Image (cartoon, rainbow, N blue to C red):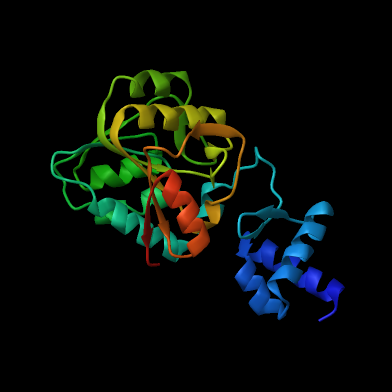
Amino acid sequence: MLTPERHQLIVTLVKEKDIVRIHELVEATGASESTIRRDLSELEEQRLLKRVHGGASVLQSKIEEPTILEKSVKHEREKLAIAKYAASLIKPHDSIFIDAGTTTYQMLPYLPYDNIMVVTNGVDIALQLIKRNIRTILLGGELKAATLSMVGRDAITALSQYRFDKCFLGINGIDQHHGLTTPDPDEAYVKQLALQFSDERFILSDSDKFSRVTFAKVGDLQGITVITDDGLSQEEQQVYGRLSTLKVVKA
């Protein structure tokens, strides 16, 4: 395969999958790993993609955020496996915070107990919880249409009144140097407080979110349990396993 053809294939795969690993590109192109690494450097210089740990991702603005509909159709199998495991961690009489998001939403059918207290900033999450007769508090504030989440001063004021056994949060970026990030500072602050007020803290993230950085810092990886899928390479598992408690589930 000629270099221009290989470059075009790499760019196409990145656009289709959002993020691809080096071993996937080696298999797709038949080129050596060193050649692929060189290709990625050249394509990054041309601003056609972004190099990340172990592969490449689509070039995306740090403040750009997919809508809830766009998120819901991506990595469905991985999100379901992550959500099932996360739900299994809940105990009777737990007080928990469930963050707005498509992966956290997938937890709801698998909640093992009804005798829990849930605080959430997700409108769609609250509606599903009350169908289960689970005691639910929906934070007030400004409704963010793109993610169906409550944010702003009123949400922060309400959240500050509660303390949790566990919190379950979605995230847009996990990076070994920059920690946990999300595009919206208002959502970042809600997540920060949920982490601060919880005894056990869980981040639910499919493997494509790793080595990504978005605009607003949520927190560091220390003291966090990250639940992800087996699409994370062994090298990345070692890196992030040193920085956090990493639980990898089979998708």
- Residue 154: x and y in percent read 42, 19
- Above or below residue 35? Residue 114 is above
Q: Quadrant of residue 161?
A: top left
- Residue 101: x and y in percent read 44, 45
- Residue 69: x and y in percent read 53, 52
> The N terminus lies in which quarter of the figure?
bottom right
Residue at the image point whose x is 66% and y is 40% from the top? 62
Which of 12 and 128 lies nearest the eye of the viewer?
Answer: 12
> The C terminus lies in which quarter of the figure?
bottom left
Which of 142 and 236 lies nearest the eye of the viewer?
Answer: 236
Residue at the image point whose x is 43% and y is 24% from the top? 141
- Above or below residue 22? Residue 163 is above
Residue at the image point whose x is 83% and y is 75% from the top? 5
- Above or below residue 173? Residue 144 is above
Q: Is residue 74 visible?
A: no
Q: Taking 181 as reference, is 59 left or right?
A: right
Which of 219 and 106 lies nearest the eye of the viewer?
Answer: 219
Residue at the image point whose x is 38% and y is 59% from the top? 248
- Residue 49: x and y in percent read 74, 56
- Above or below residue 118? Residue 42 is below
